[in-house]
Structure formats: structure tokens, C-alpha cells
Image (tube, helix red, strand yellow):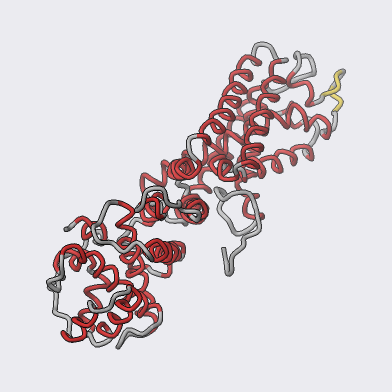
Amino acid sequence: MTDFADLIALPGEVPCPVPELAGGDDIDAVFRNRSTVDRVAAWRKVLARQNSGIWRLFAFHPGTVGRSFTLDEQAQVRWQMLAEIYEAWYGMAADNAVPGLGAREAAIGAGYLARTRWLLLSAPFRWRIDGEPVDSLVERAREAREAWLGVLAAIEDYPSLAAIIDVEADARDIAMVEIGRDALEEGSGGDPARSGICGYVVTRILLPRFAWYDTARTIRRMQGDSVLWRWYGAAALFALAVAAFLVGLAWPWVFTVSAALAVAGYAVIAYSAVAMPASGWVWLLRQPASSAVGLLTLAALPADWWSRSAPGTALAAVAVLTAIGFGYLAIEAGNHGAQGWPLVRRVAVVGTIGFGHAAAVSVIGLRFVLPAFAATAEAPGVPESIACWWSARGCGPALDPWLLVLAATAWSFVSGVFLQILWDDQPITAPLAHVAWRKGPR
């Protein structure tokens, strides 16, 4: 059977010669053990007698091992034998008990072995493998999943491994495979840890790399189709807010309706995020929160800032601010591993979401908040107030409403991008600040 051999092969792996294991009598004794624990312990004794070539073969050429390594075992125990050998190798590497290896070499090898061990132990949950032991398989597979997830979360400690695998693809694979007895036996329990695993994958691996689409797909897989109605409901309200704003260009009083619809959109997001926290992650809520702080700084500007700017100057400012905001996001995404076309695509998506949040926050703030704090300037014969932007013209010279909102949006967007630095050491795509119940740096 070669299916699991293809599964465990490293990307770009080149076949190599397969040396023989030393210690024939000890190998024969392995198969006389009845329990998995005893067989793994027996394999450790066998492997402790091997040379460095055997170690390199199993650690760095798992595809070759899966296709070519054989002890004339029966077909139904082949997967079981390889899974137990890799458990033994992983345990030895984790314990720094591989003969002739230093701590650093053992740690690097443990990263490679963690991947192969996970893929082997999860194979029965992907397709049926005859003869798999059910008793401890679920527990062992879940342990292997945690170990491999830990390696992916600290992949910068394994530069050679990071260079040949797709970290995001491996992370998505962890989130997609359900490890539970119901995958092996009809009517058995599910995978209670899977929701937490998916959340870890999204917040620690996908979102920091700006992988918004994969985040949405993973959350939908985790929460089910019910999450779509929450997303569609909020998106529909924001779409109506945009339509109302466009109508307001002809009838300014409709700007109030646009702002109210945007408030309703955020109310739906807030309700969903409280009832189902993961549903709020795709909205990148740090961006509207930071944009709101940036918008409030406009209240500290001279009272007539909005009415004295020439349209050309305002448009130039919008272009510069927007370019700065997207440029910063590109740098942040690049620092988190995105490159080439994926970087461009992801920055475009995340930046557009952020700019949209800034626009919604600006309409809400300019309509309901800023007029209460902004001062009124006396123009010749007419008191100038920002409250006039959504009402009939006649408050003195002013920017057109759409240009005023666009200028405030660009300011809020770039302010939100840079204010994120002050929150904590997290990317702008991270969920809203929360206590991290984990040891060590986040």
C-alpha cells in the first residue's frame, strides 16, 4: 500500500538507498509484544543500536521509508509497524536519546519526526486501514497532533523544515482532520479538542500571515454553516449603508440612515462575536477599534479644518495616507512570511477590509460623535460647524460630503494601522486583545 507513503513524503523528497536495520533477533522480539506501548519500547532498543545513516533515512526521507523499507511484514501490519517505529524515533529525539546526536540536531530531527508521526497516526482517520489498533489510537493521534502543531507554531526554530513545507497547508490539514472514535467506530464520540485546535491554527498561524480566505474556510468548517448567516447579515447591513450613502449625495439627510445602518452592522458583529467568538475573527475587529481612536483625534484639529481644504489637496492627502497604510500592511505581511502574489492578494484583502471599517467608523463618527466634541468656528457671517456636512448646504464653504468622509476614512485607516503597534505585540489581523492562557511569548 503506498497511499500513506505519499502522505508522509516531504515535498521535493528525493529517493535514497535503504540500509538494513541491525539486530535481527531484537527485531523479531518486537513483534512478540502484544501491546503498542511494549512494541514502541522494544523499537527504541532496536533503534538505539543503529548508525547515523538509519537516523537520517527515517527523519529526513519518510517517503522513501514508506515506499521501500520492509521487514517482510504482513500487509495489514505495515502501517502499524511504521507508526510505532516513528513513535519510537520521535520519543528518542524528544528525549535527546539518539546515539551520536547533539541536542540541537535531535531537536531539529524531532520537528521532522513530529510531522511524519502525525501523518501516520492520522492516516486511519483519513481512510480505512485494515488492522489498526483502536484502543489507544485516538489518544496517540491527538498527542501527535499537539506535538506537530507545537512545531508549526514555532516553525522559525526549524528553518530547514520551514523551507520545504507549506506551513499553512500543514496547519489547515491539522484543523480539517477529526480525531475521534466516530471516525473508526459507528456511534462513538467526536473530537472535543478540535474546536480549540482550529482556533489555535487560525489565530496563531493563518491570521498572522494575513490568510483571510483560509481563516474563513477553517472557521466555517469548525462552526458549521450557521456562521454564514451571521456573516451575511452583517455584510448586508454594510452594503445597505453604502447604498444609503450614495443616495445621500442627492438627499443629504439619508447620510443619517447610512450611519444608522453601519451601527446596526456592528451590532450584529458584536452579538455574533459574543455568542460565537470565532465568528468575529474574520471581521478583523482590531481595525475598526483602532480607526475609532484615530477618528476622535480629528476633534482636536482646528474647527475649520474640514471647510478650508481645497479638493485637490484633500484628494492628494487621501492618496498618500492610503498608500502609507497599505505599504505598512505589506511590510507586516512580508515579515510574517507572505511573499509574491499571495502577499499582494492578502494585503489587498486585509487592507480593503480595514479601509471599509474606517469608512463605516468615519460615517458613524462624523454623524453621531464628532459634532458633539468638535468646536465651531466663526466664518464671515456664518458659524461653521462640522454638523452641517449631512444637512442642507448653507453652512459656509466646505468640502463635498463624499470628500469629507473619504478624507476622514483615509486618516482613520492609517491611524488605525499605526495605532495597532501600541496595543501589544500582535499583528493587526489578530483577534481583539484577550488574556492568553499559555506560557511564554505569544
Quarter of the image with the N terminus is bottom left
Q: Is residue 76 above or below residue 243?
A: below
Total labels: the figure holds: 0
In this view, the residue in front, 207 or 96, is 96
Q: Is residue 29 above or below residue 421?
A: below
**Residue 115 in the image, given as x and y percentages of width and height:** 34, 64
**Residue 195 in the image, given as x and y percentages of width and height:** 51, 51
Q: Is residue 319 visible?
A: yes
Q: Is residue 295 above or below residue 164?
A: above
Q: Quadrant of residue 392?
A: top right
Quarter of the image with the C terminus is bottom right
At 46% from the left and 53% from the top, the residue drawn is 191
In this view, the residue in front, 297 or 282, is 282
Compared across the picture, whether 296 is left or right of 379 comes to left
**Residue 438 in the image, given as x and y percentages of width and height:** 59, 65
Q: Is residue 408 visible?
A: no
**Residue 14 in the image, given as x and y percentages of width and height:** 17, 64
